[in-house]
Amino acid sequence: MSAATLTADTPRKIQIALVGPPNCGKTTLFNTLTGGRQKTANYPGVTVERKSGQLRTPVGHSVELLDLPGSYSLRARSPDEAITRDVVLGRQTLEGLPDAVVCVTDATNLGQHLRLLLELRQLGRPLILALNMMDIAEQRGCQISIETLSKQLGIPVVTTVAMRKHGVQDLLGEIDTLLDQAPTTAGTATTDEWQEPSPDAIRAYHREVERLLKEAVIQEGAPERLTRQLDRVVLHPVAGPLILLSILFLMFQAVFSWAAIPMDWIDGGMAALQEAASARMVDSLLKSLLVDGIIAGIAGVVIFLPQILILFLFILLLEDFGYMTRAAFLMDRLMSGVGLNGRAFIPLLSSFACAVPGIMATRAIAHPLDRLTTILIAPLMTCSARLPVYILLIAAFIPNTTVWGGIGLQGLVMFGLYAIGVVGALLAAGILRLTVLRGNRQALLMELPSYKWPNPTNVLLGLWDRAKIFIRRIGTIILSVLVVLWFLSTFPGAPEGATEPAIYYSFAGIIGRGLEPLLAPIGFNWQIAIALVPGLAAREVAVAALGTVYALSGNEEAVTEALATTLASQWSLATALALLAWYVFAPQCLATLAAARRETNSWRWPAFMFVYLMALAYVAALVTYRVALALGGG
Amino acid sequence: MNVYTEQERQALEVGCLVKAGLTQPLGQMPQGSVGRILAVSGMGDHDVERGLLEMGFVEGACVEVLHYGLLGRDPLAVRINQSMTVALRQVEANIVLVGPLLDPTGPGTLSSQEQNG
């Protein structure tokens, strides 16, 4: 929604903000309250997700509910938390002051979580406290006097069990009561006076929480035991890293093996579509554009949807279960060695699916230098867009044999490419932190939440979000690149009596031939040079482009034979290996550069990212090509 | 009048306890041991101090060191008041001074929870 829709003649929509510390079940409560009717967009200027949903209260108020990023305090330490602060204080230009704030706290951890409520109460705005996860607290024998707490705080208090929709009616009722009392216009600007609390002010909040709990808690609950016992294994100095490695191994196994079946379906479906279109249309430029350009290109990309979804399914499950912070704990020492933060593990892991959500996830990293380093190395994680290139070249050039007693050579090469990316990223981070990004480190300070069963609704809604982002990308960037590529490789046509294939004379051919002298030292021919031109926009397009280049080259076999066979007969092994090495490093993704631009709010860092990765790619390909030639791979 | 301010008095007390070997930085505590936080001082760095306070490392809180990392005992996982576990690095952990649990039934300790529950 744009600011323009909030004009005077349309009644202002009632806005309620959900605020709470991380891991208090806020998102589950949000999903329950809005019933999945929600919109995800970005706040202007930053890529922090703005999640909002519609709900109707029993009395009939139509409310827009905002799910704000989790925060322990209004004193924002990361871009994520800054959004929470700005919305609550009415500093976010898009929103204005929310009509009411619902502060969600984990009832099993009130001692730590009530402080945020006290900070919010200080603002003097309409406020409701929701004690979430009340069922777990009660199971542990905890008894809290809601009346006392409400009286002491001077605000309405409700208990909720977000996962089972308990207490949601109570909460809606309180919202109604509050809305009918509160002035419906946006509040006055009292919150302008807000200042960050000093250390002693935080100590005073702690004492106040202690006093409140002494009054309101009738019986303390027994401490959680299961999480402690699990952590004894999961965070064990030896067993912990082994478990982490096994989980990662299982994850990548799943990405490759489970995805094979849906990928076959998509492949079959797209082939059928191509055939149908081909049979129904008369030979024309339009048919060429549709069949050779668009359908073939999209087929090459949409096929990765299953792999991306499986990877994100794992990430979302592990995150909801509470394991991701444990992984960050285990990885922190290793990553702090190269100047990174353990928290960077999660964005980097997401980058294996796609660097764009990975770069967006860095907003949870508070320290600007840590965050910038993570953004700059995220494209080195082998994203799924590289897979088509890797799969194609490995199938074409690496023999399908086994080495060292049963390990497949092809799989080993694939693993090696992933490993080079990771090692390269760690080295790059270390060098960046010693040179351009020198500065002090950020504290880790990370809550390790109690383990809990993942919530299916949360996971499914999260997956749906990822799928939408990917499909939107296909529909916008990739589709337009494909059309441009088709145009470049079709016009101008071959002259009369041409000896070379038509594409040789096209714009793409001219650009490719122009780049050839630059790329010849690393073993790339003009066909590769042409494929790399559109491949700069999106990596996976290069496969489609190679297909187009060879199919349009008049090489009839290329159409019927597999592209792999064609390449195997036309390229040297050294060229193929050099192209693989190039692909580990090359920054061939407009979407990633655009995401880096949004996150850093300048062109300087994406430009730097492009240059350093391009230089790395060239050197890597050059070394690989020369070494392979010297070893007889020509 | 030459009287100590409250802060100076606290600093002196903590200093005496350190000298007597009764307090230690959080990062030096043996795994599995418990104690009560005596002082959190960022030594002028208010951001680290506030960060620690906001995660529950406040004077009077009961802490238990649950886990240490493999290399250099870094990072460490600390349970605060039996309710929240926080991971932090040695650098920050050593800003937190921990003394013995003089009153094992005080707020946030194991035995107080077991008595009640």
Image (cartoon, rainbow, N blue to C red):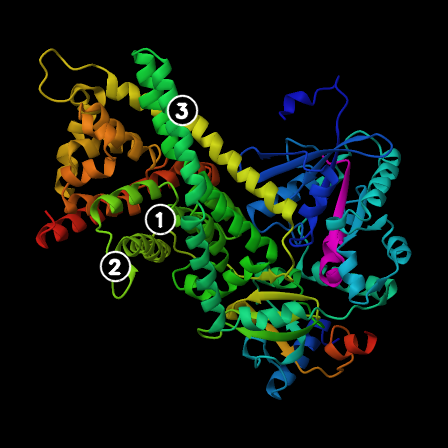
What whole-number distance in Å separates the C-alpha atoms at marks 3 and 1? Answer: 35 Å
Other residues around mark 3 within 10 Å, as few (<14) / some (14–19) / many (≥20): some
What whole-number distance in Å separates the C-alpha atoms at marks 2 and 3? Answer: 37 Å
- Image quadrant in which you'd find residue B35: bottom right
- Subunit of label 3: A
Residue A498 appears left or right of B93: left
Element type where label 2 sits in the image: strand
Is residue A520 shown to the viewer in this render? Answer: yes
For discs 2 and 1, the disc positioned in front in the rendered view: 2
Question: What type is the residue that disc 2 sits on?
Answer: Thr
Q: Name the residue carrying label 3.
A: A273
Residue B5 appears left or right of A333: right
Q: How many marks?
A: 3
Q: Is residue A493 magenta?
A: no
Q: Is residue A103 magenta?
A: yes
Q: Name the residue carrying label 1.
A: A380
Question: What type is the residue that disc 1 sits on?
Answer: Leu
Residue A331 appears left or right of A286: right
Q: Which residues are magenta?
A: A97-118
- Image quadrant in which you'd find residue B42: bottom right
Name the residue: 39% across, 26% down: A272
Q: Position of residue B27 (x, y in %)?
A: 55, 75
Q: Name the residue carrying label 2.
A: A402
Query: Do the residues indicated by labels 3 and 1 lie within the same chain of the protein?
Result: yes
Q: Eyeballing the image, is A504 above or below A445?
A: above
Other residues around mark 2 within 10 Å, as few (<14) / some (14–19) / many (≥20): few
Name the residue: 56% across, 60% down: A323
Earlier-in-chain disc, 2 versus 1: 1
What whole-number distance in Å separates the C-alpha atoms at marks 2 and 1? Answer: 28 Å
